[in-house]
Image (tube, helix red, strand yellow):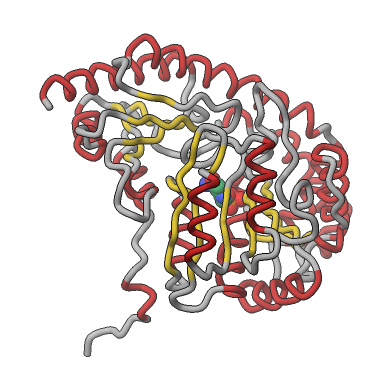
Amino acid sequence: MPIQFADRMATVHRSFIREILKVTEDQSIISFAGGLPNPELFPVADLQAAAVKVMEESGPQSLQYSTTEGFQPLRQFIADRYKEKKGIDVSADEILITSGSQQCLDLLGKVFLNKGDNVIIERPGYLGAIQSFSMFQSNFLTVGLEDDGPDLAELEMVLDQNDSKMFYAVTNFQNPSGLTYSPEKRQGVADLLKGRDVLFVEDDPYGELRFMGEFHKPVVRGYLKDDGVLLGSFSKVAAPGFRLGWMVCSGEMRDKMIIAKQASDLHTSTFAQRVIHRYVTDNNLDDHIEKIRQRYGNQREVMVKSIEKFFPAEAKVTQPEGGMFLWVTLPESVSAMELFDEAIKNKVAFVPGRPFYVDGTGENTFRLNFSNSDETRIEEGIKRLGSGIKEFLTKS
Ligand code: PMP
């Protein structure tokens, strides 16, 4: 008898990036494809000391089941940090600790999405969100990104012409484009959402990785009062292997999220939460983040400079002020999928842009990651890619 899978599995595919990462496991390939932090910056010794201390001080509790909401002192730390760093009021009670911020997307889907519900996402959009919301058989509507955030006229049109359940956005150094919403666009989004029944979901795993330019308040609580959900993560400021993220939400929404999380995994790893809390208590997280900013800032600088030197003038590239990604747009005639195959022959990899566009466009775009390669490999990789693009342009 054939195996009968659930309908939802028919529309969701394996993550394209995970497939590409298999190709790039070959060490001779310079890969700008992954979205990985630089492992040299993981605070291994400090986390080791924290783990030992947790075991010594609270071994049994740290190995026991715990509350779904998460470890209270860690939630307090996150709430205090919002006040101190972002100037927004969040209480510890409003923080739900999750297993990575990716789990927030799953919980949001469970709590909000029925089959066929409209979800507005950015164009290009975060693949992990596309995959996660697709599991709930949602229908995607998209809003194009300009250099300083979403096209507000398009957003207004999409909002006016459709009933939508949520608008999911990555407002700082977006994955994949590296773009950031300006204060004007943040205000514009808040104004457009006012009085509508559309949940704004602001995903911000990269906000603290700013190398240059001005910090902006989150849309949620900064511009949109009370409404909206804000997501955060320790993956990019400490280590992704702990799988620690969180969601800021309150009231009835928080209650529903807790029910969904209980049904999913009861709670996030008690041990991981206590180790991270011990780590941020015994160390200065700001000092650590400053090291990451310096390093990624240099890597980004080398990538931008190398692109100026080796890419043809027709290639348009975003100039992110933080985060981990650059976004390249080639002339319309070029297929980044085809370029990918050529690039692999030259031992360099990137992620073709099309999967980030649910409407099937974006063929001539691709994403470059600068956090996970050192400066020498960045320069060499961009050189190889540049000559590949030039050859491709001549041929096409
Ligand atoms: N949101 C965005 C925009 C991301 O880029 C990522 C990481 N790729 C995540 C969420 C998930 O991060 P994590 O689950 O490690 O917190």
The total of numbered circles placed on residues is: 0
- Relative horizontal placement of residue 287, taking residue 315 as reference (left or right): right
Can you say whether 281 is above or below 155 in the image? above
Percent x, y for residue 168? 56, 56
Tell me if I can see residue 297 in this picture. Answer: yes
Q: Position of residue 353 (x, y in %)?
A: 35, 41
75 left or right of 332 in image: right
Q: Residue at 87% across / 44% down in the picture?
A: 83
Q: Residue at x 87, y 39 (%)?
A: 84
Q: What residue lies at 23% left-to-right and 86% top-to-bottom?
A: 2
Viewer-nearest residue: 40 or 153: 153
Residue 91: quarter of image = bottom right
Tell me, yes or no, if residue 236 can be seen here.
no
**As rendered, which of 266 and 176 lies closer to the eye?**
176
Task: Answer left or right for 34 relative to 395.
Answer: right
The residue at the point 65 percent across, 58 percent down is: 193
Quadrant hosting residue 365: top left
